[in-house]
Image (cartoon, rainbow, N blue to C red):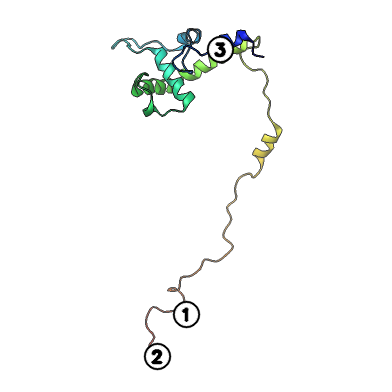
């Protein structure tokens, strides 16, 4: 049940967009992001803004090309998003936050029981592999291939 305390804790007022991270959320997520790679140029991008932009795209369904001008460039955000997806950073972030939420609620970090809906399992078994059947009707012959018609004019009367 939502209490006034819950409502204050989850209030999104004061943020630029409702999908932006609060300071408390950023404090949880920041240590889970990979550090900048050693060597090369130092990172000049605000990682919080990158995540805010990814969350904006995910929450609004906005196209990458239609990002508002006050967010970082599409190419920068998409490059980080693509990198984090391929190196499984996003998966690790999700799993860490999922485990933490379970622990805060007094449960074990991972689920201990799985439930399968028997109706879904039965529906998945129907049909089986498709069998290949030969056609039951004979293929039709074209008029030109028929022995009753001819492509040459008739020589009779």
Q: Of the residues tagged 3 and 1, which is closer to the observer? A: 3
- Relative to the observer, which residue lies in front, 126 or 98? 98
- The x, y position of residue 50, in whole percent, is 40, 17
Distance Cα–Cα, label 3 vs label 1: 84 Å
- Asked if disc 3 and disc 1 are in contact, CB closer than 8 Å, the reply is no
- Relative to the observer, which residue lies in front, 34 or 131? 34
Residue reaching furthest left? 41
Distance Cα–Cα, label 3 vs label 2: 97 Å
Numbered mark located on residue 90 in the image: none
Q: Is residue 52 visible?
A: yes
Check disc 1 and report its element: helix, strand or loop: loop
Q: Identify the residue at horizontal 43%, vertical 17% (top origin).
A: 52
Check disc 3 and report its element: helix, strand or loop: loop
Q: Identify the residue at horizontal 38%, vertical 21% (top origin).
A: 77
Q: Identify the residue at horizontal 48%, vertical 10% (top origin).
A: 22
- The x, y position of residue 92, in whole percent, is 50, 16
Location of the N terminus by quadrant is top right
Residue named by callout 2: 156
Distance Cα–Cα, label 1 vs label 2: 15 Å
Q: Earlier in the sequence, mark 3 or mark 2?
A: 3
Residue named by callout 1: 148
Check disc 2 and report its element: helix, strand or loop: loop
Q: Identify the residue at horizontal 45%, vertical 73% (top origin).
A: 143
* Neighbour tally class for label 1: few under 14, some 14-19, many 20 plus, Cα within 10 Å: few
Q: Can you tell which quarter of the image residue 135 is in?
A: bottom right
Q: Is residue 87 visible?
A: no
Q: Earlier in the sequence, mark 1 or mark 2?
A: 1
């Amino acid at each position: 049940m939502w209490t006034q305390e819950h409502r204050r804790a989850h209030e999104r007022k004061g943020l630029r967009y409702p999908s932006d991270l609060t300071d408390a959320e950023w404090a949880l997520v920041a240590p889970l992001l990979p550090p900048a790679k050693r060597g090369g140029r130092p990172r000049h991008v605000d990682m919080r803004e990158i995540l805010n932009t990814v969350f904006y795209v995910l929450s609004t369904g906005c196209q990458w090309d239609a990002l508002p001008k006050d967010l970082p460039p599409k190419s920068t955000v998409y490059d980080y998003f693509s990198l984090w997806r391929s190196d499984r950073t996003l998966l690790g972030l999700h799993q860490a936050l999922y485990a933490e939420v379970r622990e805060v609620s007094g449960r074990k970090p991972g689920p201990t029981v799985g439930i399968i809906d028997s109706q879904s399992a039965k529906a998945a078994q129907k049909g089986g592999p498709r069998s290949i059947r030969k056609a039951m009707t004979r293929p039709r012959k074209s008029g030109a291939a028929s022995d009753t018609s001819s492509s040459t004019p008739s020589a009779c009367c």
